[in-house]
Amino acid sequence: MNQLLAVALGGSFGAVVRFLVSSGIYQWLGRGFPYGTLVVNITGSFLIGILTEALILQRIAMTVEYRAAILVGFIGAFTTFSTFSLETVYLIEQGSLTKAALNVVISVAGCILAVWIGLLCGRTLFFYSEGIIQWSGGMFPYALIIVNTIIAFLIGIIATVLLQKVMLSLEYRAAIIVIMISAYLAFSGLYLVLFLIEHGYTFESNWNLMLSIFFGNGLLCLLVIWLGLAAGKQI
């Protein structure tokens, strides 16, 4: 039941973010080609590749529901094969055979390439000492923090799309962005804390290490989100 609730929660966030991102992309580039669906599918494919290494292959027993919420719920709802199929059929019915073929080729090849790149990034990050730097009395999960910053950069770009392209009131856009960034900072920091607990660290004995990594991850992700916002404005 806990996993079902986690998937439902992650799926609700994923569906909302997909709608906002795809709507922003369509308002930006138009509907002459299924750009919005293509962007969310390729982005989601990259995320599921890199997060498979970070969340599943590390096999942290305490975070089964956490992984289910992200991989099955959020990314499952964020990406959409059915919309891709429907838009391809519409292109065929409109006589745009070239666009339909292009959509199929770019979507399939692009998503497979994005998953492969994501897996390759994850495997590279966790190759050296399983993504951990250890010393007497402490450790630094550098690989997970790098994964967090990569996603933070994407969030910055997505937030730019929401700010500039989606036709919502300023209040709604501000609320969505604040909630999205706050939730990400909390969950990414929580996963790091769970990672430390899984490796034998406790709040009683290692509270300073846990707080340092939690808040350090938050500050770094905020900086990278800001960089993503700046980069998104140049697109």
Image: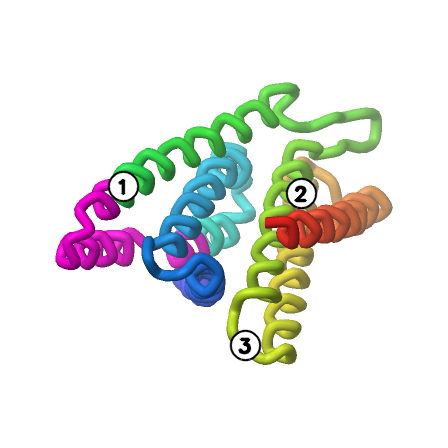
**Horizontal side of residue 25 vs 127, given as left or right:** left
Q: Mark 1 or 2, which is nearer the eye?
A: 1
Extreme residue in the right direction: 208
Q: Earlier in the sequence, mark 1 or mark 3?
A: 1
Q: Which residue is mark 3?
A: 168
Q: CA distance from mark 1 to mark 3?
A: 31 Å
Residue 175 drawn at (x, y percent) = 64, 74
Front residue of this view, candidates 215 and 34: 34
Residue highlighted by disc 2: 149
Q: Is residue 12 left or right of residue 163?
A: left
Can you tell which quarter of the image residue 78 is in? Answer: bottom left
- What whole-number distance in Å separates the C-alpha atoms at marks 3 and 2? 28 Å
Assess whether residue 234 is covered by the magenta stretch: no
Mark 3 or mark 2, whichever is nearer to me: 3
SS label for mark 3: loop
Disc marking residue 102: 1
81 is within the stretch colored magenta: yes
Specify the farthest residue to the top: 128
Rate crowding at label 1 as few (under 14), some (14 to 19) or many (20 or more) other CA atoms within 10 Å: some
In the displayed structure, 210 sits above or below 168; it is above
The quarter holding residue 129 reads top right
Q: Which is the main secondary structure of the residues drawn in magenta?
A: helix
Identify the residue at image location x=70%, y=34%.
141
For disc 2, the neighbor class at 10 Å (few under 14, some 14 to 19, many from 20) is many
Of the two numbered discs 1 and 2 on the same chain, state the one appearing first in sequence. 1
